[in-house]
Amino acid sequence: VQLQASGGGLVQPGGSLRLSCTTSGVTLSAYTISWFRQAPGQERVFVAGIRQSGGRTYYADFVKGRANMSRDNLKNTVYLQMNSLKPDDTAVYYCAAGRPVLSALDQTGLYGYWGQGTLVTVSS
């Protein structure tokens, strides 16, 4: 099982980015795929997730209204579109696959597979 995160980069405040998580060895519809981020010196925190059953999406409060997560089962890829980016969004973004219960989507220990991370820098 492999997850490959991409799409990070340098963006100005107010700009947008689309992160991609391409998977292999994982049937997307059988796993919850979530994005986490980790800023320097901080813990890794949940950003957004898409559930394996039904494909419903969930977002952390700090990105609600600014992010949209989607899934393309044919391409085995999950996307995170982020808009109105702020300097506080600067972090390494990781995608992860697992089967956490709904109340535990934000628990990093419940995800068995992780991508390598992609750096997002929001700065003028």
Image (spheres, rainbow, N blue to C red):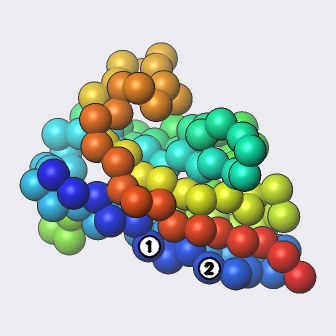
Can you identify the residue that label 1 sits on? 6
Question: What is the three-letter code of the residue carrying label 2?
Answer: Gly
Q: CA distance from mark 1 to mark 2?
A: 9 Å
Residue 32 seen by the camera: yes
Say which residue appears at 47% left-offset and 60% top-offset. Answer: 117
Say which residue appears at 70% left-offset and 81% top-offset. Answer: 10
**Image quarter of the C terminus:** bottom right
Residue 99: x, y in percent? 28, 29
Residue 80: x, y in percent? 50, 62
* 80 horizontally vs 22: left or right: right
Can you identify the residue that label 2 sits on? 9
Q: Label 2: state its secondary structure.
A: strand
Residue 98, picture quadrant: top left
Question: What is the three-letter code of the residue carrying label 1?
Answer: Ser
* 81 horizontally vs 98: left or right: right
Residue 19: x, y in percent? 49, 69
Residue 15, picture quadrant: bottom right
Q: Residues within 10 Å of mark 2 (few under 14, many from 20)?
A: some
Q: Label 1: state its secondary structure.
A: strand
Residue 18 seen by the camera: no
